[in-house]
Every structure is written in C-alpha cells, then in structure tokens.
Image: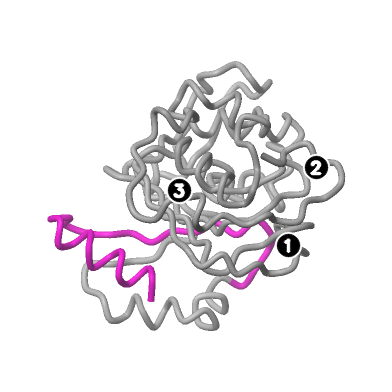
Amino acid sequence: MLIAAVIDTIYRLGAASVIVAEGPGHIRDTDLLLHESGLRAQLETLKRTSFVDLNFDSVTRVVPGTGLTQLEELWLPTTVQSADVVISMPKIKTHHWAGVTLSLKNSFGILPGSIYGWPKNVLHWQGIDNAIVELAVSVPIHFVIADGIEAMEGNGPLHGPMRRLGCLVFADDPVAADATCCRLMGIHPSRVRYLQMASPLGNLDTNHIEQRGEAVEGVAQQFELLPEFAHLRG
C-alpha cells in the first residue's frame, strides 16, 4: 500500500503521470514479481500510472562525470533519463560489499540488465563505492522514501535476518537520507566509504540536516554487522 499512497500524493501535488520502474539485479520473472508482491493489483487501481521493467527499457548514452571508474560511457534507461523527478524507494539493509544498501546503492536497479547482464557485475568490477557515486552523479535522486518497517541486518542484502525497525525515512537529499538510515542502524555514516565519497553531493553532518518527525535516537537500533564491517558502528 505504500507505493499507492505515494502515487496518490504525487498526483495531489499536480503530476501529470507517474511511472513505477524496477530493474531486478538477478534474472527474474518480473511479471510474476508484480503479481506476487501485489504491486500489479495496486497499479491497476491508479489512473495515469504505468510500470517499466528497466532491464529492458530503451537506453540513452551518458558520459560518466566523475572519473571514478574506467567506464567511458553509461547506458541508462530512457525512462529514467527523461523523468522530471526521480524518487528512490529502497529497503533499509546491510550489504556484504558496501556495508549498507540504501537510496544511492538502490540506483544499481536503474542499470539495464540487457546491457550489463545479471547481477550487473560490470559496475561491481569498477569498485562498488566508485560505481555508487558515479551513478549518484549521472542519475540525480530528487526524493527518497526509505522503507525500514521491516529492514535487514547481518549478511544483507539477500541472506540476512529481518530486523523490525518500524519506520520510514523521507528526504529530499539522498546523502542525508542514507546518513540518517545509517544512524537508525547504529552505524556511523562517515565510516561508510561510498557516503564519504558522496558527501559533496549532499549533507552528511547532522548539523546540516533538518530533522523532522521522531528523533533518530528514539528509534535507532543496533543492527548486526558482518565482522568485516564492525568498524562502521557509531
């Protein structure tokens, strides 16, 4: 129901149309996922709303802007490149390579599998932190809705146990969103390498984040981390 509520709010703000898009990192039957998740049923109740499988969308060539990777070009879905507003809706999780996977890492779901294969290792081979920041520059995120109602700890993003965090994070700054999600997980954001690298793109320091709603300290929990990421604890 979260996506339906978000879309309804977007229309109330005056949007002409909304596209829900996803690009699973592993080969999946996307139609089956839409059915079993209940997302198709939600979308069918909404007018002017469509779904695009980004793995098979038409693509637009983009020249990388950071020099952090050795890639001379990125092929990105035309649907995303032509959008007026991009909203990232990640699950709050730990990650066995990046430490955490939040709104900026969520941009890996933009990459078309038809170009980069599955699980899109071309970007991983460039250094996962480098690739995350490259995508943050190439595909700016305008708004974040991070779902931490049921989060994941330990060996994420696939094999960790569920942690009931019971909160949502809304932000118009993806760096601030990810930093806040880290604090909710008991992680010091400045120790997460990709967030250190992406800090010029947004706000990492709490002194520069306007916090509304519940205080982070009242909601935060200590997530289990893999031993190699123990140093991330706040």
Residue in the foreground of this view, choosing between 206 and 59:
206
How many neighbours does mark 2 have within 10 angstroms: few (below 14), some (14-19), or many (20 or more)?
A: few
Report the residue marked by disc 1: 158
What sort of colour scheme is used for the picture? one colour
Please indicate whether residue 225 sits to the left or right of residue 10 in the image.
right
> Which stretch appears magenta?
1-29
Q: Secondary structure beneath disc 2?
A: helix
Q: What separation in Å lies between label 3 and label 1 (alpha carbons)? A: 28 Å
Q: Secondary structure at mark 3?
A: loop
What residue sits 52% from the left and 55% below the top? 90
Residue at 76 percent of width and 56 percent of height? 224
Give whichever of discs 3 and 2 has the lower sequence position.
3
Rendered-image quadrant of the C terminus? top right
**At which x and y percent is residue 214?**
39, 55
Instruction: Identify the residue under disc 3.
Output: 58
Q: Which mark is residue 230?
A: 2
The kind of residue on which mark 3 rests is Ser
User: How far across and down, in percent of the image, does residue 160 sit?
Assistant: 76, 63
The residue most toward the front is 218
Q: Nearer the viewer, residue 223 or 160?
A: 223
- Choose mark 3 or mark 2, whichever is in front: 2
Task: Kindly report the distance in space between the C-alpha atoms of the residues bearing marks 2 and 1.
Answer: 19 Å
How far is disc 3 from disc 2 in space, using C-alphas? 41 Å
Neighbor class of circle 3 (other Cα within 10 Å; few <14, some 14-19, many 20+) is few
